[in-house]
Image (cartoon, rainbow, N blue to C red):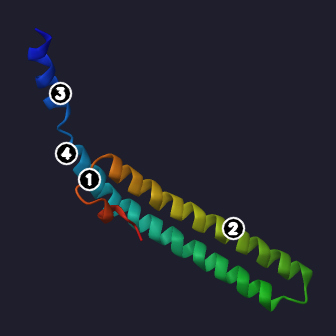
Amino acid sequence: MYDLWFPRIASAAADLSPLRNFILKVEVVILNPVIKLGFAIALVVFLYGVFEFIKGADSSDARKKGGWHILWGIIGLFIMLSAGGIMRLICGSWGMPNPQSCNPF
């Protein structure tokens, strides 16, 4: 008796294509541009910190301020790379047709 119900339930639960399409569209339209923008901002902060560190080589305050910018730039770059990796993991876990299309970089 249970054999008659399980295949119907399993086939009804397996149809996740609308959810997959929604996740893919949100990822491509919203998350990828946000990740790219965050990566660009973190890179600019890092490069500004390097410039500030080199420019103020004779002042300990300028070196300290540049070091903080470098540190926060590296942290931002790590966060953005991790967000891109998490998005690839989600796309791969949901069985997207082409997981490479989920790569924000």
Expressed as whole percent of the image width and height from the top left, the position of residue 47 reads 65, 82
- Horizontally, is 97 left or right of 54 in the view? left
Q: CA distance from mark 2 to mark 3?
A: 48 Å
**Amino acid type at image mark 4:** Pro
Callout 3: SS: helix
**Amino acid type at image mark 1:** Met
**89 vs 58, nearest the viewer:** 89
- Dot label at residue 10: 3
Q: CA distance from mark 4 to mark 3?
A: 17 Å
Q: Is residue 10 above or below residue 84?
A: above
* Dot placed on the residue nearer the N-terminal end, 1 or 2: 2
* Dot placed on the residue nearer the N-terminal end, 4 or 2: 4
Residue in view at x 12 percent, y 24 percent: 7
Q: Nearer the viewer, mark 4 or mark 1?
A: 1
* Dot placed on the residue nearer the N-terminal end, 3 or 1: 3
Q: Which residue is mark 4?
A: 18
Do the CB atoms of the residues marked 3 and 1 lie less than 8 Å apart? no
- Horizontally, is 29 left or right of 75 in the view? left
Expressed as whole percent of the image width and height from the top left, the position of residue 93 reads 34, 47
Quarter assignment of residue 26: bottom left
Residue in view at x 25 percent, y 60 percent: 98
* Dot placed on the residue nearer the N-terminal end, 2 or 3: 3
